[in-house]
Every structure is written in structure tokens, then in C-alpha cells.
Image (cartoon, rainbow, N blue to C red):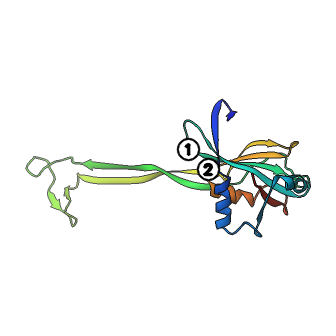
Amino acid sequence: MIVFKEKTYSEFEAMRTLYTELGRAGLLRGGMYDIINTSQLIPILKGNNVVIEKFVISTSMFGKDKYRMYLKIGAKAKLPDEVRLPGRTNVERLGRISFNFKNNVGGGGNQQGGGKKNKNNNGQRSFGEVGGRYDYSADIQLEVQNLLGEAIKYDKKARELILEFDSVQDAIRALNILPFGIRYKTYLLET
């Protein structure tokens, strides 16, 4: 169990889910990612490589599941001062607002000073020149920037990184744009 920022998270193994998704995309075994065992870990970490040590589902009491990826960074991989993954901008619809304004000054046909009743083409009644109707509606939208993932822990000295994602697909997208240089290779640690 992990205690972080006074919240308690329990973790459930999700490496099989990541493995399956990478396999579906054709990225395993001769593709972009290889699988190693613990005896291969030290030689791999001497090079320009990144190793996914574990991939888990983290749950909190009030919130949806998050996916955490624990990475070890090889000795020859370039290390930035801080890790921030790019985001994408989405427009979220918050709701719809509409107003109807109706002006019945002058009222009906039998009252004094009232306007003359006319029937227009769409069947609605309007009252002379002093009455009218105005309809207004609009969507309420908010432009939101969602990060691909969030760096929960980055230890440059220990060469460790923990990333958190909303989905497995976001985690896979992030593997291609990690800030460790251009030609690093990514491995999955078989546990």
C-alpha cells in the first residue's frame, strides 16, 4: 500500500493489461518493446534504455482508477531537470442555456389599446407592433488542457520515474515521447 499526500492508494497488478495492449498494437517481440527478466536488468540499465518495472492500477476512495507506471532509466539516457508530459486541449460542454422573452404589451384583441391579432406562417401568434417574442440559446463550453500523464515522482539521482495516467492507451502514447533523448529503447520487466 502507498501513502501519498495523505491519501491511501491500493495497487493492483496491471502489467498483463499493458502487455496485452502493446501486443494488440504489434509493438512487442521484435517491435518497439522487448521483455526482459531480472537477470538482464543490470546490463540493460547500463545503456540508453528505459525499463518499465511495474504497471499498476491505483484506486482511491473518492475517484476513478488511475494507472501508474514505474520506470527505471538507463545510465546513458539523457535526464531532464523535471518531467512534464505534453497535453491536449479539449472542449468540454458544461451545459446549455436558453432564454425566452415574450412581450405581450397590449394583450388581446378585445381590450382597448390592444394590438391586432395576426397569425404568421409558422402558426405562432404575435400581437400587433407592440408585442413580440425573442428566443436565445447557447452552449456553455470550457476549453480544458488535459495532460497525457502526470509525473508523481521523479528522482534524477536514483534514475527513477513514476507516471500516472487516466488510461492504458495514454500510458502507451507516453512511451513514445518520454523526455530521455531520441534513441532510447524501452523494455518491460517480466515479474
- Give the residue drawn at x 58%, y 55%: 90
Say whether marks 1 and 2 touch (CB < 8 Å). yes
- Give the residue drawn at x 76%, y 55%: 190
* Residue furthest out toward the top: 6
* Residue furthest out toward the left: 110
Q: Which residue is mark 1?
A: 64
Q: Is residue 34 left or right of residue 118?
A: right
Question: In this view of the protein, can residue 180 be seen by the observer?
Answer: no
59 vs 130: above or below = above
- Which is nearer the eye, 11 or 114? 11
Q: Tell me how far mark 1 sits from mark 2, CA to CA.
A: 9 Å
- Give the residue drawn at x 23%, y 52%: 131
- Give the residue drawn at x 52%, y 52%: 92
Residue 166 at x, y = what percent?
A: 61, 50
Q: Is residue 139 left or right of residue 34?
A: left
Q: Which residue is mark 2?
A: 166
For mark 1, give the secondary structure: loop
Quadrant of the image containing the N terminus: top right
- Which is nearer the eye, 114 or 104? 104
Q: Amino acid at mark 1?
A: Lys
Residue 178 at x, y = what percent?
A: 77, 56
Numbered mark located on residue 26 in the image? none
For mark 2, give the secondary structure: loop
State how many labels appear. Answer: 2
Q: Earlier in the sequence, mark 1 or mark 2?
A: 1
Question: In this view of the protein, can residue 107 be seen by the observer?
Answer: yes
Q: Is residue 57 left or right of residue 47?
A: left
Q: Amino acid at mark 2?
A: Asp
168 vs 158: above or below = below
Residue 110 at x, y = what percent?
A: 7, 50
Q: Residues within 10 Å of mark 2 (few under 14, many from 20)?
A: some
